[in-house]
Amino acid sequence: MSGGGESLQKALDEAVAPSDVIKADAPFARSKAEEFGEGAAAIVVPQAVKVGAFSRKDVGAAYRTAKKMLSAAYLDRVTLLGGKPAAFARLLDPEQRKDLLKNLDHKNQKKNSRGEVASFAKGQAELVGDVIKVQGKMSAKPRKGDDGGPELRVTYEYRFVYAVRKPGTGLIARVMAYDKGAYDFWRDAPGGSLRHWWMGSDDRWQAGVECEPDDGFIWPTYPGAAPTGVQPSGPVQDAYAYGKSTDEDCSSVGDI
């Protein structure tokens, strides 16, 4: 078949291909995430201005720290593939770091800290390509600490969309991780170094995954694959609707 004929055949094949098939060479095609930014560059640090008792320089430093922590929690390849979240741990306050590492992959799920970062269950997912889609925002506001001293709170709300392949197959799925939370910044004494503390998440969930994993890892659901765990159910929700949790009842979601 000539080159022109091959192009025609390719167009015909694509025209009859199932619309829900995700292709490795364009894993975000036909997805709302296609318009998102890519990787750490999409975690945009706002222009810093003076906030309360904190200078523009302080606020800028706080934003940059927040970006590093979000990147380490959701974009670090070692962590995503089930490895030790060393990149995230390094950025934590020493006390939080100790607790995170002490309880990493703990058998008691009430103590297990694996879910504090995004990690796919080993043997369940391979990242497709080098692109992770990201969209969100962060902002800063003043507050009083428990001791009455000034603190700076950086709040964030982000979506991370991954394309993953079921190992040993051609099955590809998109998975979304949503996180809304905050970091607090303060000084122990005037002129001292700026410290920070991760306040945790007000709302955090994943879509396109099995329900209620018992190990803190993300277990993707793949179209056409036999279910291996508790599956989402109930009315279909929009995973792209800001501020709306999708996992209160492990709800089904529309296209990711």
Image: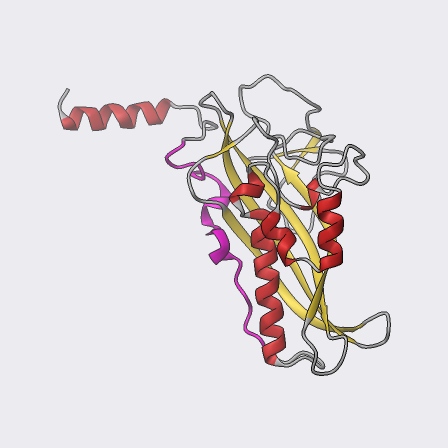
- Occupied quadrant, residue 209: top right
Q: State the residue in front, 76 or 176.
A: 76
Q: State the residue in front, 48 or 92.
A: 92
Q: Position of residue 223 (x, y in %)?
A: 54, 24
Asked if the magenta segment contains residue 108, the reply would be no
Q: Is residue 37 above or below residue 239?
A: below
Q: State the residue in front, 216 or 179.
A: 216
Name the residue located 13 percent from the left edge and 23 percent from the top edge. Answer: 2
Asked if the magenta segment contains residue 43, the reply would be yes
Q: Quadrant of the N terminus?
A: top left
- Occupied quadrant, residue 90: bottom right
Residue range of the region highlighted in magenta in the rendering? 24-48
Q: Is residue 193 above or below residue 133?
A: below
Name the residue located 68 percent from the left edge and 22 percent from the top edge. Answer: 229
In the picture, measured across the screen, residue 14 lies left or right of residue 178, that is left
Name the residue located 69 percent from the left edge and 41 percent from the top edge. Answer: 114
